Image (cartoon, helix red, strand yellow):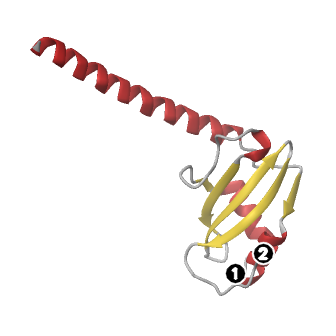
């Protein structure tokens, strides 16, 4: 019985390792699939409002698209292609620590919102 429990414990450990490896591979695939050079970038009304009150311009958003790190814990990547949400984070040339949420569909991106992670700006966006 003791040997059986040891074998089950080892299998359980191997199973956990396999799950971690599969999650890592899935995250890498999502990062490879993200188009950092879209044909067009669109901005939602909400994103434009947030950009204005947080003093973020289009060049900073483009920086995040081109160079930002994908925050997988804040992204929604299990949806169908046009419904995936990527959370991109990084430091802008204006020294703002930003997170932008974008939706990718075909060769185009839509910026959904823009967040300054370093400062809580007063905004009146609906």
| Picture quadrant where residue 93 is located | bottom right
Q: Residue at x 37, y 29 (%)?
A: 17
The local secondary structure at tag 2 comes to: loop
On the rendered structure, is 75 left or right of 65? left
Foreground label between 2 and 1: 1
Residue lying farthest bottom? 122
Return the x and y of residue 60 as percentages of the image width and height.
73, 69
The local secondary structure at tag 1 comes to: loop
Residue lying farthest front? 1
Q: How packed is label 2: few (under 14 Cα within 10 Å), some, or many (20 or more)?
A: few
Return the x and y of residue 5 as percentages of the image width and height.
17, 18
| Picture quadrant where residue 26 is located | top right
Task: Assign the C terminus to one quadrant of the image.
Answer: bottom right
- What residue does disc 2 label? 57
- What residue does disc 1 label? 54
Q: Residue at x 74, y 76 (%)?
A: 50
């Amino acid at each position: 019985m003791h040997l059986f429990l040891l074998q089950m414990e080892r299998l359980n450990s191997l199973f956990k390792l396999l799950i971690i490896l599969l999650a890592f591979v899935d995250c890498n695939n999502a990062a490879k699939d993200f188009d950092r050079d879209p044909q067009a970038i669109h901005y939602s009304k909400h994103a434009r409002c947030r950009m204005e009150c947080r003093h973020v311009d289009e060049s900073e958003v483009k920086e995040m698209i081109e160079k930002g790190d994908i925050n997988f814990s804040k992204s929604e990547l299990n949806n169908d292609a046009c419904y995936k949400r990527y959370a991109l984070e990084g430091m802008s040339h204006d020294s703002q620590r930003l997170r932008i949420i974008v939706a990718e569909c075909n060769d185009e991106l839509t910026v959904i919102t823009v967040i300054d992670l370093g400062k809580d700006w007063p905004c009146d966006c609906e």
